Amino acid sequence: MKALNQPKYTGIIWLVVRLWLGYEWITAGIEKVFGEGSAVWVGPKAGTAITGFLKGAIAKSALAPGFDPANAHPAVQTWYATLVQNVFLPNATAFSYLVAYGELLVGIALIVGIFTHFAALMGAIMNLAYLLAGTTSTNPQMLVVGLVILLAGGIAVGYYGLDFFARPMERVLFQRTRTRFFPQPQTDGPKAAVPLNITSWRGLTVMMISAHPDDIEACAGGTIAELTAQGTRVVYVIATNGDKGCSAAFCANWTSERIALQRQLEAVNAAAVLGVKAADVLLLDYEDAMLTSYPEVEVRQQVVSAIRQFKPHVVMTWYGYPTFSLLPSEGWDDLGYHPDHQDIGRIALDASFDSGVGRVFPQSGPGWQVQQFYMWNFVDITHYTDIKDTLKDKIDAYLQHKTQYPEPKVVGESLTLVARMVAERTKGFSGQYAEGFLAYF
């Protein structure tokens, strides 16, 4: 059943729907822009055709000469006829170009799958305008399909189109714009971070919630090694199957399914190195890089179910908000950018609250209240773990993720570098290697 929510499957259905709607729009646009009658739309006589259409709309309203007052329900409402008479008709030439090229561009956008939701919205607005003007034709069907795409399509509607490539860039552009024009309020500066009181977690359960199979070891491997060594139970919840991420040198010509199976096996093996039992590794199996395309409430319910099943006292996860000060040129790669990381962080935070409210998702079992919640963080660090003695364990665990970095030397150097950079960014910490966290409650 989960396949019904995966864009690579539902995207095929949306592709067919999109192509039909795009074809309807592009044929209408081509006729107006390039057809035999184009002169009355975009040529020397631009505005002629739409003027006739608009006058026809007025003739169907109460504003028409000789209108019978006994007709309480004219085909065109008075308010719309007034708008046509005072706004559209005086600017008929401009609206003629707008309609002709609008239909053409909406059709192209829907067919190639670029800015799909915006195109569906613009198409729906035109369909509604035609219907209000008293024209039926295929407008009702097109309006319904456009609204369905707009409201229910999600990321899947553009999965087999240019949106597949454009959406990540749009997301980064949006986040950069928000950061640039709506900056976080300035404070007096960060307070000194304090070490995690791990010894107080003896006898408790700590849950790590990640987006990908290799995230947990990269962010908290040293901390986990220390926790399991003192007898604390650690549980993994991994949202995606990692089927998109694999080194070309290791996975050449592999299918996504084979990559997913390999990565899930690696996750269990890496957990074992750190003392985490296979039975305590829960794989939710969502598609890699597509977490935001699934209904948020569905993913949140899955995480709530996991929390109520394993009953963790402490939850740790990704920082749920992009941090653009983590520059790739400084060696941070995608730690501040990946949409899956941000999405699972926010969902885990909401789920940790929801899990304590028994009336929320009652089908997921009795409520369980999480006592402490931390996000893995590399900049705004409130708590840290000194991993000088467990860095080797962290590296050994990550070496199990051979699909990511087949070269052991690269793994060791990369994780050591990140641990050193976190230590340098942790105010009040004088050690050499650290893992950082931001406490929420």
Image (cartoon, grey):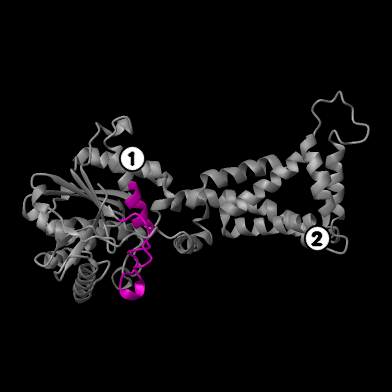
The quadrant where residue 356 appears = top left
* Magenta segment: 319-347
Quadrant holding the N terminus: top left
Q: Is residue 327 above or below residue 109?
A: below
Kind of element beneath mark 2:
loop
Residue at 80% of width from left, 49% of height from top? 88
Residue 430 visible in this rendered orientation of the protein: yes
Residue 339 drawn in magenta: yes
Q: Is residue 262 visible?
A: no
First along the sequence among labels 1 and 2: 2
The residue where tag 2 is placed is: 35
Residue 342 horizontal/vertical position (percent): 36, 55
Camera-near label (1 vs 2) is 1
Element class at badge 1? helix
The relative height of residue 128 versus residue 70 in the rendered view (above or below) is below
What is the C-alpha distance between the residues marked 1 and 2?
53 Å
The answer to whether the residue labelled 1 contacts the one labelled 2, judged by CB atoms less than 8 Å apart, is: no
In the rendered image, which residue does mark 1 sit on? Answer: 301
Q: Is residue 190 left or right of residue 160?
A: left
What x and y, as percent, mark residue 357? 29, 33
From the viewer's perspective, is residue 279 above or below residue 422?
Answer: above
Residue 304 position within the rendered picture, expressed as x and y whole percent measured from the top left: 29, 40
Quadrant of residue 185 in the image?
bottom left
User: Residue lying furthest top in this view?
Assistant: 70
Amino acid under label 2?
Gly
Q: Residue at x 28, y 56 (%)?
A: 261
